[in-house]
Amino acid sequence: MAQYPSTRLDASFAALSDATRRGILEQLGRADASITDLADRFHMTLTGMKKHVGVLEQAGLVETEKIGRVRTCKLGPRQLEHETAWLERYRERWAARFDALDDVVKELKDREKNHGRTK
């Protein structure tokens, strides 16, 4: 994988690793909000909320715009295509492993059923 997508993946997953930041994204998915509104909603200081928003903004997941004294946040342009593709590759691998495990379990059950348990 090229350096840029890897760096972007790192930033995205780091941003998404925090429950508060995921909550911010959920909130912004419903409506744009000021940093003050977000801080109140999440019972945080303005400084703490600014740090969370900054991490999301660096990852391209949130955009902010300052009008007067109010900084408004909205979802960014990124739609997590690279992150989704990366996760899908691993989901497919795990699904294949679980399918193979199901086959082994079925085979063992069939063998047990046909030959009975030996004690």
Image: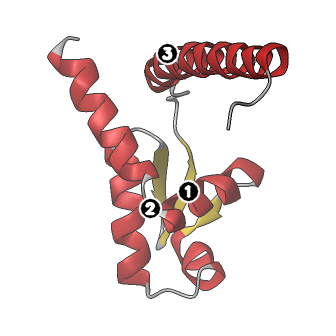
At x 57%, y 88%, the residue is 43
Q: Secondary structure at mark 3?
A: helix
Q: Quadrant of the N terminus?
A: top left
Query: In this rendering, does residue 71 appear at all?
Result: no
Numbered tag placed on residue 22 in the rendering: 1
Instruction: Report crowding for label 1: few under 14, some 14 to 19, many 20 or more residues within 10 A (C-alpha).
Output: some
- In this rendering, which labeled residue sits more in front, label 1 or label 3? 3
Q: Nearer the viewer, residue 37 or 93?
A: 93
Is residue 18 placed above or below 99 in the rendered structure?
below
Assign a secondary structure to mark 2. Answer: loop
Which amino acid is tagged 2? Asp
Q: On the image, numbered disc 2 is attached to which residue?
A: 18
Provide residue 24's location: percent of width, then percent of height: 58, 61
Q: Quickly name the residue at label 3.
A: 93
Question: Toward the viewer: 57 or 104?
Answer: 104
The reply to whether dot 1 and dot 2 touch (C-beta < 8 Å) is yes
Of the image marks 2 and 3, the number of the one nearer the N terminus: 2
